[in-house]
Each structure stands twice: as C-alpha cells, then as structure tokens.
Amino acid sequence: MKVASGDPMRTLEKLIDTGANRSKARAEEMMDSLYTTILKKCNWKDEDFVHDYPIVMGAILVAQQPLSVRAWDAILSPLLKSSIHHTLAELAPLLLGVREPDKPIRIYINHSTTSSDRTEPESSALHRYLVDTKRENIRVALHCVETLNEDLCRLDGLGLIQKLPEKVELSPIPPETLAEHFRYARRHVVCHLNQVLEPPERLNALVLAFLISNSHAG
C-alpha cells in the first residue's frame, strides 16, 4: 500500500472488508478479489511494465526455488524492456524480498490468480493479469541451458581426469564461488526441461550443444 496510488487506508479497508457480501464468497473468489485489487494499482499505462510483467511474474511462479533480485536480474534482464527493479517495485504488495538484492523473493500467498494453469474460466477483470506459465517455463529452461553452456567450461577444477587412482578425494567446488543463477541452472535445468511439451528449435539446439560439448565427461 506504500507504493500504491490513492488513500492507503481506504485501500486497506477494501482489502480486509468482512461484510455480509464478502462472507458469502468462496475463498477462491476472495483471493481473486484481493489479487485483482492489488494488481489494478500497477501502472498499466506504462508499456515497459506491460511487456515485462508476464516475464517477471511468470518466472517467479515457475521457479523451483525462490531466487534473489540479483539472480533474477541476471536471468531476465536480456528479456526486459526496463530494469527488473521497476517491475518488482510495482508488484511489491504481492512479493517478499523485493527491496533486498540478496534475499529470496517469495509470493506472499501462493495463489493461482495470475497463473494460466487455472482450470476454471477466468473473469474478464482477471484475464489481463494471467501469465502463460508454460511459455515462461520455456524461457527459464532456455536460460538454464544457456548458462550451463557458457559458464560450465569456465569453472576452475573441472575437466577430464585421466588415470585416476582408485581412492582419491576430489576437492569440491565451494558453492559460494558460484553465481546464484548458475547454481539454480545446474540444479533445476532437468526439471524445467521435463515440463516443456513442445520445445522450440532454439532450445533443442542448445540442449544438443550441451550434450555434445560434455559427452567426454560421461
């Protein structure tokens, strides 16, 4: 409510209204109303925000674990028309952690209002806020494979070891030396790929390049 236009106290009254009409509504309808009220406050006249909203919200929805603003910036910045901080500031009433670059971003309440995976018909008021989670999952999958293709070969301590003794301890790579978005790609790339039903040609090419470049490690 701090970043929303209008009287914040009046906005709060609308959000927590528990009158007779509200008490009869289904829980799903009440959550839809809450999310719709919040999202209406965003600047939908800003073309950059309209373009970036489904990319940012969709990525957060499909993520297998919460990531920080810094990590999302590294992942999504090539796709966005404006700074990710601008989009997250608009969505701040729905998200935790947007003002701390290293804190994982979490949705306050995990609800399907903004997800296209809903099984029931959407109201016209809700339709504009839905994001195509299948499409956004493909975007995240693309980034994961691209990251592994570009950065895996640059890691110190990796490579083919020949004539390895039977008993030897290999020094692990300290996780703190790896970028957060790289650690995410390494851990969750398979999960995102498994959710892609019709992979685009570019994704197929990236996966093939990864398999070819790393086939010697098998």
Image (cartoon, helix red, strand yellow):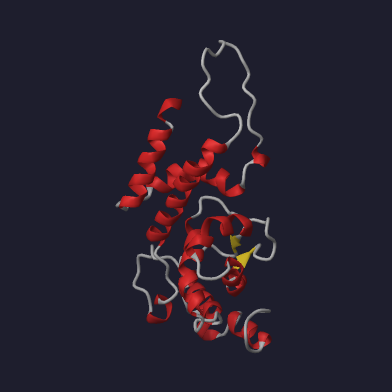
State the residue at coordinates (56%, 29%): 158
Examine the image and state in which quarter residue 156 appears. top right
State the residue at coordinates (64%, 88%): 10
Q: Position of residue 191 (x, y in %)?
A: 44, 45
Q: Relative to 30, does residue 61 appear above or below in the rendering?
A: above
Q: Position of residue 200 (x, y in %)?
A: 32, 53
State the residue at coordinates (39%, 65%): 116
Q: Position of residue 108 (x, y in %)?
A: 60, 65
The N terminus is located in which quarter? bottom right
Q: Position of residue 165 (x, y in %)?
A: 57, 11
Front-lying residue, 110 or 104: 104
The C terminus is located in which quarter? top left
Q: Relative to 169, does residue 55 appear above or below in the rendering?
A: below
Front-lying residue, 151 or 86: 151
| Residue 199 seen | no
Front-lying residue, 57 or 87: 87
